[in-house]
Amino acid sequence: MDVRTALAQIADIVGPTGLVDGADAEALLIDERGLYQGRAALVVRPASAEECARVVRVCNEASVGVVPQGGNTGYCGGATPLDAENQILLNLSRMNRVREIDAVGFTMTVEAGLILAQAHAAAEEQDLLFPLSMGSEGSCQIGGNLATNAGGVAVLRYGTARDLVLGLEVVLPSGEIMSNLKGLRKDNAGYDLNGLFLGAEGTLGIITAAVLKLVPLPRSRQLAWVAVTDPDAACRLLVRARRESGDRVVSAEYVSRASLELVLEHVAGARDPLDKPYGHYVLLELASAEADTGLRAVMERILETALEKDEIQDGVIAESGRQRDALWALREAIPEAEKHDGGSVKHDISVRVSQIPTLLHDAEAALSALAPHRLSVFGHIGDGNLHYNVLPPPGSNLQAFKDKFAASLTAAVYELVNRLGGSFSAEHGVGIEKRDELERFTAPVALDLMRSLKKAMDPNGIMNPGKVLSQAGRTG
Ligand SMILES: Cc1cc2nc3c(=O)[nH]c(=O)nc-3n(C[C@H](O)[C@H](O)[C@H](O)COP(=O)(O)OP(=O)(O)OC[C@H]3O[C@@H](n4cnc5c(N)ncnc54)[C@H](O)[C@@H]3O)c2cc1C
């Protein structure tokens, strides 16, 4: 089938409501960070898994690339098509129903286009929690979360997106639908096929629905914003909090003074929670499903001991829901504040928690030798995952800075992370942006296996061409 015929058939399948054009299409073609200006032969929004399957079947027959897109909040360009003749953008936002909540089995079955915050709201109506949580939750979608194996601020307690899935419905590159929505906690019948699609960034198939794990809604929470002496003290505080709270730490977020200052400068109404500036902060949250568990006393005890041991210098415990929201807002606003400042060279890296002090120390030394710069370092210290972002000196243009220094700065960060046994891609994925790093830092035997899987599952290379693996299928 030639491409023109295929595009006409796809338009027929989705109908006028499923076709996106003009300014609406343009908005979907540019990525979250404005780094990639996309091009596509067609932008479609199918209404169901069946429509998706019919579209993919046509694409497979005509060798037309299919780029799945959720909320388009990804940081690596994975949801952006890059071929005006031979790729379509398939946006899942119309497929946004909650199909079922099983309050006995603690699961919910949802369609891939459901926005994460809406999944939270649906679970909460049943006094339950879907514990995946991140700054983009008002826009990102379950399908995108699963396709990127998203992390966020509660991984320490509940795991990444992968850990929260019991089953998937997937449209395969052949156009067949593979449905495993039984929602079983135990099912060892053969290979873990669901696992193949989690973190695959749409390169192996389109996730159209999922069974997600739920937990009881926490009834008590305690949140503290503390100034820690140094990154080593931050790690010691984390260990202390986990041990002394009976592992009720949900979040342990690191915020450098430089990141907080960006928020104070660029975000209206933001104010420093402490009376004077400190170099490093940790946002520590404990939670329990029980209403009155003396969690406040536990938090106070942890902080008192940490103060005695010189791990912390100052701190505040949220006294109300409003204060809790305000403290979280400081942390969540950092990406937006960086954007207002002109943008940054981002690194989403992970090491073992015990390596964080070495990472921060050695990275700063390495980067100082390479270029004048500012740092904005923050992230999920409880998971060993930091966003190690490099900004140009005040008043300098980001693009000029990137042209001159980004390659060497990024290489230095990733080399160090690799030396420490860490990962260049902790939670944001690979997309277009980190394909070269995947090649560079992945063992050949593992890369070969990834390519073999891609070839076996998508022989015509139609699924998200050129993303994750540069050599498999056609590149974008
Ligand atoms: C302010 C902000 C804060 C963020 N914080 C975090 C954080 O704490 N942790 C974190 O992990 N990420 C974070 N992110 C990154 C991003 O929000 C996540 O990666 C999110 O999971 C992407 O979801 P999405 O629906 O926007 O996916 P998209 O950006 O639309 O797509 C991402 C990738 O998944 C593929 N895809 C999308 N939907 C499907 C589907 N149904 N089937 C198959 N493939 C699909 C796309 O092709 C693409 O490769 C943040 C982003 C922003 C802007």
Image (cartoon, helix red, strand yellow):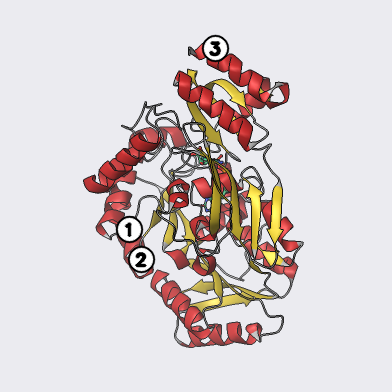
Which residue lies under the disc numbered 2?
352
Which one is nearer the viewer's eye here, 200 or 428?
200
Vertical position of residue 199 compared to residue 466: above or below: below
Sort mark 2 into few (<14), some (14-19) or many (20+) by Cα contacts within 10 Å: some
The residue lying toward the viewer, choosing from 131 and 94, is 94
Sequence-wise, which precedes: disc 2 or disc 1?
A: 2
For numbered disc 2, what is the local secondary structure?
Answer: loop
Q: Is residue 61 left or right of residue 71?
A: left
Front label number (2 vs 3): 3
Above or below — where is 297 with respect to 424? below
Q: Is residue 345 left or right of residue 106?
A: left
**Residue hosting label 3:** 5
* Front-lying residue, 473 or 283: 473
Which mark identifies residue 400? none
Q: Is the distance from the Cβ of mark 1 to the nearest ligand 1 atom less than 8 Å?
A: no
Residue count near mark 1 (Cα–Cα under 10 Å), binned few <14, some 14–19, many ≥20:
many
Residue 278 in view (yes/no): no
Inter-mark Cα distance, 2 to 3: 52 Å
> Residue placed at 45% from the left, 48% from the top?
199
Q: Which residue is mark 1?
A: 422
Judging depth in this view, the residue of 275 and 202 nearest the camera is 202
- Spot occupied by residue 182 in the image (x, y as percentages of width and height): 58, 55
Give the SS element for disc 1.
loop
Contact (Cβ within 8 Å) of mark 2 with mark 1: yes
Q: Is residue 147 above or below residue 352?
A: above
Q: Quadrant of residue 230?
A: bottom left
Secondary element under disc 3, as helix, strand or loop, is helix
**What residue type is disc 1 on?**
Gly
Outermost residue toward the front in this view = 189
Amino acid under disc 3: Thr
Asked whether, in this view, residue 41 is left or right of residue 391, the answer is: right
Q: Could you say which quadrant of the image residue 112 lies in? A: top right
